[in-house]
Amino acid sequence: MVGLARRPDRPALPHPDDRHTGRDRTYRHRQRTGTGLVTSAVIQEHAVADASGGLYAVTTGPDSALWFTLAHSGQIGRMVPGERPTTYQLDPAGQPTIIVTGPDGALWFTESRAHRIGRITTDGETTRFPVPSRNGGPYGIAPGPDGALWFTEMNADRIGRITTDGETTDFPLPVTGAYPSAITAGTDGGMWFTMNQANAIGRIDTDGAITTHPLPTEAAAPVGITAGPDDAVWFVEIAAGQIGRITPDGTIHEFSLPDRASRPHAIATSNNGDLWFTEWEGNRVGSITRNGKIEVHDLPTPRSEPHGITLGPDGALWAALENGTLARITTPGR
């Protein structure tokens, strides 16, 4: 559910540079919403890699640049909006996946197939550390309230912790076959994570105590998760086509998307308090307000396969599309 699965019938995409000729493409259009209303959005495509590179996750770095992972080619990329991107080669088979800014001013990332946690400075110097469990399959990573970074080990049913010096520990989950996926710091001092195959949301204290919260919808397969602006944690259910919200006491609400087959993948908070998410199968990005109003926006290029999404250094939302482009999303007047 979480990996880099491709549709077997998907035709090969043209090279990004063939489509864009090194320039941005801008689209302004009106979109359908969950309430039947319409709104306008501006989506700009920025080519940053070959379509075969597997553009996967994106985050804003401490240097006001966008940093992204290329899972298939084993690279980390950096782009200042309006400038040409730079890439740094890692293990070609390592599969860098999620990337975040750490508490030490560097970028930290997971290598799911190399079973390592990586660190890259804003100058491109890299260091990698093996995860505690052999073949653990690290996926999600996020800075915690204790000055360390916390990560998931999909294959080992564990949550890991790594200090900025590279010291690692991990904590077993109370269930097997859970496939822990994305992770985020909540406002309550805990780390919250999705358990993709256990169909639950988990919480771990900095001392390692774990609590699990089953989802109301069966086989929802949660993946992306983020802290919201309302002291709750928000997440996406890739198999159910829903957005979820969980409060610190474990109360869960679910909101159905207009297209239940859209396979939402990642979610992030915008600067106006709305939550934005990607629809991998639906080829869309969307937003949800704190009271559940949903709007969705088609991406300009068919079958672009959006994965990660983040709030950019310019205040816009940026989504990583597997076809090798970063999409910049703005909603004028909001």
Image: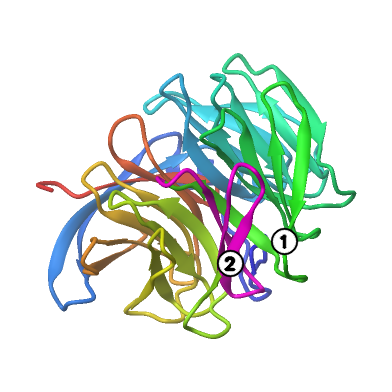
Looking at the image, the residue that sits furthest to the left is 333
Q: Which residue is mark 1?
A: 173
Where is residue 151? Give x, y as percent.
66, 45
Contact check, label 2 and label 1, Cβ < 8 Å: yes
Asked if residue 210 is positioned above or below residue 74 in the image, the reply reads below
Where is residue 217? Give x, y as percent.
48, 84
**What's under tag 2, amino acid-wise?**
Thr
**Which structural element holds mark 2?**
strand
Crowding around mark 1 (Cα neighbors within 10 Å: few <14, some 14 to 19, many 20+) is: many
**Residue occupying image coordinates x 41% and y 23%:** 64
Looking at marks 2 and 1 on the same chain, the residue that comes earlier in the sequence is marked by 1
Asked if residue 234 is positioned above or below residue 207 in the image, the reply reads below
**Residue occupying image coordinates x 62% and y 18%:** 121
Q: Is residue 283 left or right of residue 190?
A: left
Crowding around mark 2 (Cα neighbors within 10 Å: few <14, some 14 to 19, many 20+) is: many
- Residue 12 visible from this viewpoint: yes
* Magenta segment: 187-212
**What's under tag 1, amino acid-wise?**
Leu
Looking at the image, the residue that sits furthest to the bottom is 218
In the image, is residue 69 part of the stretch drawn in magenta?
no
Query: Residue 172 lies in what quarter of the image?
Result: bottom right
Viewer-side residue, 47 vs 257: 257
- Residue 70 visible from this viewpoint: no
**Residue occupying image coordinates x 68% and y 28%:** 163
**Residue occupying image coordinates x 58% and y 22%:** 106
Distance from Cα at disc 2 to Cα at disc 1:
9 Å
Where is residue 134? Give x, y as percent.
90, 49
Tag shown at residue 212:
2
